[in-house]
Amino acid sequence: MKKTKVRRNYDARFERGMRVLKRMGRQNLMLNQKALSPEMYEMSVGHLFGDVWGRPGLSLRDRQLVTLAANIAMARPTGNHSHYLSAMRLGITRRQIIEVMIQVGHYCGWPTLSNAVRQFTEIVEEQKQAKKLGKKFRSKLL
């Protein structure tokens, strides 16, 4: 009986996480995890997006701004591209993304700003190229 209740709770967390990912336009995120280990993928979707991103208290947009700032501050070499795309899908403008970069750059150093500019520019250029070719945008950087 207890395992059934636990599984239902886990399924609910996963479903909540998938709803969050869909709102962000990231439902195809982490499919490499799914291929390697379906259990790892379910944990990531259920916990990270179902429990953390799905919490009350901050809007999805606010959580995305916080995540952008944290990732920019850490100067992550990968992973930020999908967050820039999610930010734009959630209505965060290019100007607002640039403002986050400027704010973080002043607190964390210009190298973090330079890294963020490079990554965001890659996404913007991909979008421009897709539009120019009349193709549906799908980033190759994810």
Image (cartoon, rainbow, N blue to C red):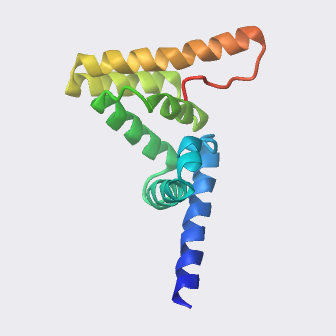
State left or right for residue 131 relative to residue 52: right
- The extreme front residue here reads 36
Q: Residue furthest right?
A: 134
- Which residue ends up furthest to the bottom in the rendered image? 1
Q: Residue at x 31, y 27 (%)?
A: 75
Residue placed most toward the observer, 131 or 46: 46
Q: Residue at x 46, y 61 (%)?
A: 51
Q: The C terminus is located in which quarter?
A: top right
Residue 20 in percent (x, y) is at: 58, 52
**Residue 138 at what x, y percent from top left?**
67, 26
How far across and how far down the image is residue 79, in percent? Answer: 44, 33
Residue nearer the viewer, 86 or 13: 13
User: Which residue: 38% across, 21% down?
Assistant: 116
Q: Is residue 121 above or below residue 23?
A: above
Q: Residue at x 75, y 23 (%)?
A: 136
- Work out whether 83 lies above or below 15: above
Q: Is residue 119 left or right of residue 38?
A: left
In the rendered structure, the answer to whether residue 132 lies left or right of residue 76 reads right
